[in-house]
Image: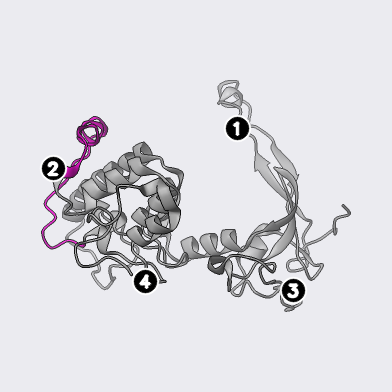
């Protein structure tokens, strides 16, 4: 595929320099590694070519930052109801990973744009991704890191108490483990971790979330759940006054139990018994 010579926004060559990391061998030998030049070319539907960063820096992703023409398209006919109304940006992307043709970058742009505006949500976004992937060990490690971070922040606050300007607000502060456990995706239909686990068929993650963020009776948990939690260093804390994760609803008003019903036999034994929805709070 022929590539434009320069970015339509900044007029600089469509390349990027990246330093190769060679396991520290160059440093040990006393020589600095030389940066390598790679393609950095996003070919938009309007036919303009941009650097990835130039596209990310745009305030509005639905139009080209160079020519202002629309670059979004609707889902193909026959898409599921859940996919309706979700616009796409289909591009050819050429970077250090090679050439990828006809890929939808709208989800990536939304994610990157959101994290630029709210960097403190990075762990929350990672948490949701771990729930989707079924990586309960990574979830435990992330939650434990929140506790370590909170301890460090408390020590820092004590040391910096005097002489500090207190005009700032709470924005930008790292989230606690409790907040992350109950996080709902503001750019992904308000999906919670439990919704994500159920939608992707991950029972181990669902059990962990129920243990750590609900009042579901402990007598109903398999012994293996407690054993695994102990190995990973996490355990249920007092849930008094905290939001029960089973009560969370997505943007369509669905509980995790509603998603389980849609999944069919995969969640047999989990429906209608209060495991995925609070008593009296189950979906229709």
Percent of width and height locating residue 244: 21, 60
Do tag 2 and tag 1 residues touch (Cβ < 8 Å)? no
Quarter of the view holding residue 5:
bottom right
Instruction: From the viewer's side, name the closer residue of 200 and 94.
Output: 200
Q: Are marks 3 and 2 in contact (CB under 8 Å)?
A: no
Q: Nearer the viewer, mark 3 or mark 2?
A: 2
Helix, strand or loop at mark 2: helix
Label 3 and label 1: CA atoms lie apart by 34 Å
Q: Find the magenta span and give its range.
A: 219-243
The residue labelled by disc 1 is 21
x and y percentages locating residue 162 in the rendered image: 17, 61
Viewed as shown, does residue 67 lie left or right of 52? right
**Residue at 72%, 39% in the rendered image:** 36
Residues marked 2 and 4 touching at CB (< 8 Å): no
**Who is closer to the viewer here, 269 or 9?**
269
The mark closer to the camera, 3 or 1, is: 3
Residue 68 occupies which quadrant of the picture? bottom right
Q: Where does the C terminus fall, quadrant-wise?
A: bottom left
Tell me which label, 2 or 1, sits earlier in the chain: 1
Question: For this view, does 17 lie left or right of residue 212?
Answer: right
Identify the residue position indicated by label 4 in the image: 253
């Amino acid at each position: 595929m022929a590539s434009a010579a320069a970015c339509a926004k900044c007029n600089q060559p469509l390349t990027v320099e990246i330093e190769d990391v060679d396991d520290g061998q160059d440093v040990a030998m006393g020589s600095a590694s030389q940066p390598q030049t790679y393609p950095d070319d996003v070919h938009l539907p309007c036919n303009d070519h941009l650097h990835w960063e130039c596209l990310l820096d745009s305030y509005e992703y639905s139009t080209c930052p160079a020519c202002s023409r629309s670059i979004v398209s609707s889902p193909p006919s026959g898409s599921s109801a859940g996919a309706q109304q979700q616009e796409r940006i289909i591009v050819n992307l050429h970077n250090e990973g090679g050439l990828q043709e006809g890929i939808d970058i709208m989800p990536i742009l939304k994610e990157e744009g959101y994290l630029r505006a709210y960097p403190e949500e990075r762990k929350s976004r990672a948490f949701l991704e771990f729930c989707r992937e079924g990586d309960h060990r990574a979830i435990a490690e992330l939650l434990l890191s929140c506790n370590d971070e909170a301890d460090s922040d408390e020590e820092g606050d004590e040391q910096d108490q005097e002489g500090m300007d207190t005009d700032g607000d709470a924005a930008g502060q790292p989230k606690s483990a409790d907040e992350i456990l109950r996080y709902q995706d503001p750019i992904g239909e308000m999906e919670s971790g439990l919704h994500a686990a159920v939608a992707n068929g991950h029972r181990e993650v669902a059990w962990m979330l129920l243990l750590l963020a609900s009042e579901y009776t402990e007598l109903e948990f398999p012994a293996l759940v407690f054993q695994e939690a102990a190995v990973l260093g996490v355990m249920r804390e007092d849930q008094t006054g905290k939001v029960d994760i089973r009560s969370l609803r997505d943007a369509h008003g669905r509980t995790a139990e509603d998603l389980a019903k849609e999944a069919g036999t995969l969640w047999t034994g989990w429906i209608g018994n209060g495991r995925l929805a609070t008593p009296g709070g189950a979906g229709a």
